[in-house]
Amino acid sequence: GKHPTDLFSNVNYIQFISDNCENRLDWKKIKIESKNDTLLSKIMKAVHTGLWPQNVGKTDELYPFYMRQNELTIEQGCLMWGYRVVVPTVLRKSTLSTLHSTHSGIVKMKGMARSYFWWPGIDHEIETLASNCDICINFRKEPAKSLLTPWPWPTKPWTRLHVDFLGPWNEKHFFVVMDAHSKWIECYITKTPSTDVVIEKLSDCFSRFGLPRSITSDGATCFTSAQFKLYLANLGINHCIGAPYHPQTNGSAESAVRVVKSYLKKYNKNCGMSLSRALNNFLFFYRTSVHSTTNETPTKLLLGREIRTIFSQMRPDLEDIVVQNQMKQRNNYRGRREISFEVGDPVLIRDFRGTQKWVKGKIMDVLGSQLYRVCTEENLQWISSFLM
């Protein structure tokens, strides 16, 4: 077999967050290619008219869509299955390449795909892609050597953190932090596993997410020093220490370390990307992927919302739809024409006080695009937009 270091020579490493705008996937490109796709254009016509062929067989290319006809819609010229955009044939290869770029494994890739896009047979294509990838095969997850000690799941985010060090790896250490509730991972590249480093990196975490109730670690010197104990005590954070030489008793940290370690094995220093940037890209993918334990993304559980990803751009943007509808509404509105006045112009101003609906006046000042200060014949000054 190949030596692990030789595997990267034939790998076309594609950046998850691409610098090449031509490779960027967005709904506008999907809209164009959907019109050019013979099959999808037929499907969209059927969705639009409600007229589907009868007696569609299982071997017919229409069949996967025919079985989902009541769940298909068209948004901004894109075919949607529920909240997932249907990707045209010509864009599927690049979509899979982007999905596979961090070599996160079959489960993670399927989870990410199910959050954003679909086409018939996508699960099988993901399995085939990972099964034929030397990196994914060589560094696939090993069976657990022993059972992890279970911890009760915190009902709130960022209440219990698990911390540990990974390394040395290429003369670097990695300080790993995992939130037990959301499974959110922070990872810092460091030179040494010292107490000063731990305090510095935790302070960075706390500045963004607040103080946890407790921190769990192993019995390494950097975690048991008097300096670290005092640091946590001053912040009102409880410290739980796992059994020495048994990382399984700090299960969440062990899991986080395994996740990061798995990626580091796949990292190729010749990919044209620094380790720091590549690690950030991987963490981005991990945090926005559905976790198998929680069935939610770490981002959703920690931040309370999903964040924008490269795949978010594949779905028609709700904001764009709202803006376009507002423009249509404005253009179709016949109840009032746009008018403007200048200082000194005679006008009629709406009077809401009595039976006389309109009184004469003169523009004294322009306060905005449709707001004026008006002086009436009675020498009253009003601020109004109800003029003619």
Image: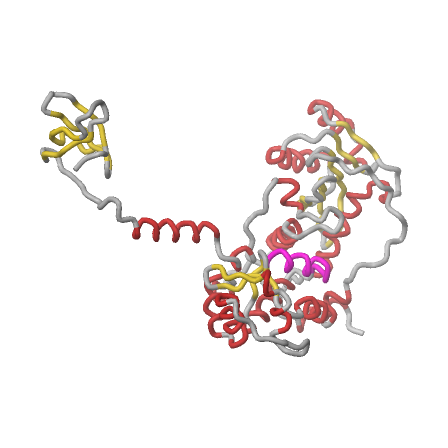
Q: Which residues are magenta?
A: 104-116
The residue positioned farthest toward the top in the image shown: 379
Tell me which residue sits at (73%, 59%) in the image. Answer: 107
Q: Main secondary structure of the magenta part?
A: helix
Asked if the magenta segment contains residue 111, the reply would be yes
Residue 299, by quadrant, is: top right
Q: Is residue 330 visible?
A: yes
Q: Is residue 327 left or right of residue 142?
A: left
The location of residue 176, given as percent across then percent down, is: 72, 44
| Numbered disc total | 0
The one of 156 and 250 positioned closer to us in this rendering: 156
The location of residue 194, given as percent across then percent down, is: 73, 38
Tell me which residue sits at (24%, 39%) in the image. Answer: 369
Coloring basis for residues: secondary structure
Q: Is residue 267 visible?
A: no
Tell me which residue sits at (66%, 42%) in the image. Answer: 301
Residue 64, by quadrant, is: bottom right
339 up-or-down from 25: above or below: above
The one of 67 and 285 positioned closer to us in this rendering: 67
The location of residue 226, given as percent across then percent down, is: 78, 27
The one of 339 and 252 positioned closer to us in this rendering: 339
Asked if the magenta segment contains residue 166, the reply would be no
